[in-house]
Image (spheres, helix red, strand yellow):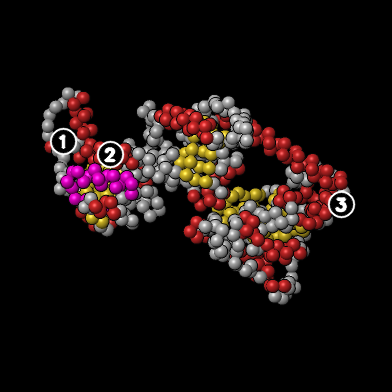
Amino acid sequence: EVGGRFGFTALTLPRYYSVHDMQSHSLWEQRDSRRLGRHCSEEPPPLSTRFTSKRDKMIVKSKGMTPTDILRHTSWFSNVSDELKEAIASKMTLAEVEEGHVFVQEDFPINHLMIIEQGTLTRSKMEPDEPINGDVATDHRPMKSFFDINFSSPEALEESIVVDEIEGLGRVSGLLHILVEYDSLSFATVWAKTPARVWLTPADEFKAILASKAAFALEMMGVLAMSMRVGSKSLRGLIKNASAGGAAGTAPAYPHGGDELGTTDHGDESVKRTIRCLCYDSTSWVTDSFKPAVKAYNDRASEDNAPSIIMEYTADRLSERSATYAAGYDAVCLFVNDTADCDVLRILSLVGVKMIAMRCAGFDRVDTRAAKAYGFTVARVPAYSPYAVAEHAISLLMTVNRKISIASTRVKMANFTLDTGLLGMDIHGKNVGVMGTGKIGQILCNILNGFGCNLLCYDVFENDEVKKLGATYVSKEEIFEKSDVLFLMMPLLPQTKHTINRDVLPKLKKGVIIINTARGGLIDTEALLSGLQTGIIGGCGLDVYEKEQQYFFQDWSAKNIEDSDLT
């Protein structure tokens, strides 16, 4: 029976649920102030509902392998003395659980050492709530509980971020947490992805065993020391490989004369910090631009006693394979075709990266939910060279409309004939549609206004500066129907993906010219090809492509391009 503020509830606890499980409920409100800097007004569910619902149903059995057998299969306890093994084994209880059972909840104490005999356990993190008005300290909204998520359902993965999975005989979870302190909070929720057999040892009883004999404590210290030694040597190897060329094309390590810790610049009053950043997908034009800019910044930082930057470069794009190159770096700098999905972010988090700096406006290749869960800072350049992009869009329109590329090819072949194949149209007086009127779209509208065209615009947020140019905001259907020229200037979001698709083709004005300098995914390429072949689309000018990642910014002139849509 559980008393106190929870009322009196009759409850039969499996053996491994100790008094600490009841005590941990007093930490329900504390978890936010300790981890998130705010308090939770949500009352915890009664213990009877937490541990006896269908998905948390647990059958405690003792069959199959013995506790001692299990300990022999672990990397932590296989080499400890038989006396210590027997002492731990005497406190172990086997729990056979169903798929979806929650062992430990994120931001709650880990009160048991868990050793897998069979099955797979998953560690997941809840996406952090957005604070009201950005104020974490004064946000008292109830948090969603992991006990509210049915992990046996497919929808569970949509509500959480999978950190990793642990499976296999003898895999251990929770050891380091319970050795630190009793109420050390869990980084993630641990739940059963499959039906599982897991051996559980109460944290207080495990620590009591270590405290009972000095020899036991020394044995455990030796095991931990060996683990730390192996881990630190592995990390040093990763850092050494990355710095010495494990990432192809890297600049010499520590070019500013700093040591491995990046803290050799000593001032009279404090130690100046150095930030190490690895720049992925770096070509010559990237390094030519960044190196003088970084040097200029470091010169100013030296005068202001601000942190300096060590920027190193690799031609590799960020992927699961290349993510380990970032070991030892504080930040990574990414471009449009680098992949920063959940799996990649997990690796970056493990090797110590704290920040992702996008040197572009788009961030659709960054899993922002996972980035928030792992605690990354993500930065981008919301409007870089907006005039260059807008002017480039105009150059594409003129090239398509006035058949510049065709005429150029003819002139190079000494063909100076004129025929209707080179005929374009006046932009003056035509209906020109601009979908997306942010900074770049606004500048584009200003340029187009000089052509004397009729500006039609579409955006979920209407721009007053664009309206002053005489532009008219219309619906998506109207801009498709009336535009002789259509510019796509939108970000790539789930709502904007494939704005031009097969369903849109019948709605377009016949012969429309489409210009896209935003994101390739705004256009369904197969629909575009169909529109060009049928004459619905009179021409298109693109500098982006939805499947560009494999090809763009690389030389494929002597290679076979397998993408038939691109060719």
Asked whether disc 1 touches disc 3, contact meaning CB atoms under 8 Å apart, the reply is no
Can residue 244 be seen here? no
In this picture, residue 413 sits left or right of residue 459? left
User: Residue shown at 74%/62% (left/top)?
Assistant: 20
Q: Position of residue 377 (x, y in %)?
A: 52, 46
Mark nearer the N terminus (3 vs 2):
3
Disc 2 residue type (three-letter): Glu
What's the magenta region?
438-457
Q: Quadrant of residue 415?
A: top left
User: Which residue is denoted by mark 2 in the rendering?
Assistant: 391
Disc 1 residue type (three-letter): Leu
In this picture, residue 102 sits left or right of residue 129? right
Mark nearer the N terminus (1 vs 2):
2
Q: Is residue 439 magenta?
A: yes
Q: Residues within 10 Å of mark 1 (few under 14, many from 20)?
A: some
Mark nearer the N terminus (1 vs 3):
3
| Disc on res. 422 | 1
Q: Nearer the viewer, mark 1 or mark 3?
A: 3
Q: Nearer the viewer, mark 3 or mark 2?
A: 2
Q: Secondary structure at mark 1?
A: helix
**Quarter of the figure that contains the C terminus:** top left
Which of the two residues, 159 or 107, is positioned nearer the viewer here? Answer: 107
Which of the two residues, 526 or 19, is positioned nearer the viewer here? Answer: 19
In this picture, residue 19 sits left or right of residue 39? right
Q: Position of residue 24 (x, y in %)?
A: 70, 62
User: Which residue is denoted by mark 3 in the rendering?
Assistant: 212
| Above-or-below relation of 463 to 419 | below
Disc 3 residue type (three-letter): Ser
| Gap between marks 3 and 2 measured at Cα | 76 Å
